[in-house]
Amino acid sequence: MSNKPAITVTRLDMQRLEQMLDNLADYDAAAEALEAELARANFVGHTEIANNIVTMNSKAHFYEDCSAKDYQLTLAYPEQGGKDGHVSILAPIGMALLGLSVGQSIDWQTPKGKTLKLTLKHVEYQPEAHGEFTL
C-alpha cells in the first residue's frame, strides 16, 4: 500500500491486537506489517473514539474509486476472517482498514496484483459507538 493516511486506534484494540500477536504460532510478514501499522497509529481511549472510524469488529462500507463498486466488510480477528463478509486484521485489506475514518482512501493490492483505490464511505457498525467493549 503506497497511500498511508493517518489512522486512529483505541488503546483497548491495541492491547488486544498486541496480545493476539504475542500468541501467534507463526509470527510472519503479516504480523510484522500489523506491528508497523500499530506503530504509526494515534491512540485514544475506547470511549473517546469517533464513530466514523473503523475499529475491530466494525462493519465498514467502502467503494472502489475507478469502478464505483461497493464493498462491505467487518474487520475481525484471524479466527473470524473469511467468514460471512469478515476480513482478518492480518489480511492486507484488514490492516489497511484499521483506524481509517470516513472519507479517507487507501491503495490496496488485490491477490491478483491489481492496485485499487478504496474510499471509506461509512461505518455501518462500530462496537464502541454502541457501548460494546467486550467484542
Image (cartoon, rainbow, N blue to C red):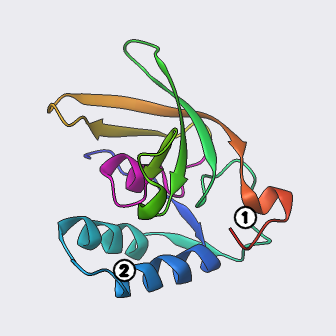
The residues colored magenta run 88-101
Check the image and name the residue furthest to the top: 67
Total residue callouts: 2
Give the amino acid type for the residue marked by disc 2 in the picture. Answer: Leu
Residue 49's tag is 1
Q: Nearer the viewer, residue 26 or 128?
A: 26
Q: Position of residue 110 (x, y in %)?
A: 24, 34
Q: Position of residue 113 (x, y in %)?
A: 14, 33
Q: Position of residue 93 (x, y in %)?
A: 37, 46
Is 92 included in the stretch rendered in magenta? yes
Whether residue 89 sits left or right of residue 14 in the image: it is left
Circle 2 Cα neighbour tier, 10 Å, few/some/many (<14 / 14–19 / ≥20) = some
Quarter of image, res 12: bottom right
Residue 21's tag is 2
Whether 30 is drawn above or below 125: the answer is: below
Q: Secondary structure at mark 2?
A: helix
Q: Nearer the viewer, residue 78 or 47?
A: 78
Circle 1 Cα neighbour tier, 10 Å, few/some/many (<14 / 14–19 / ≥20) = many
Give the residue at x 26% y 47%.
1
Give the amino acid type for the residue marked by disc 1 in the picture. Answer: Ile
Q: Nearer the viewer, residue 17 or 97?
A: 17
Whether 32 is drawn above or below 59: the answer is: below
Q: Secondary structure at mark 1?
A: loop
**Viewer-nearest of discs 1 and 2:** 2
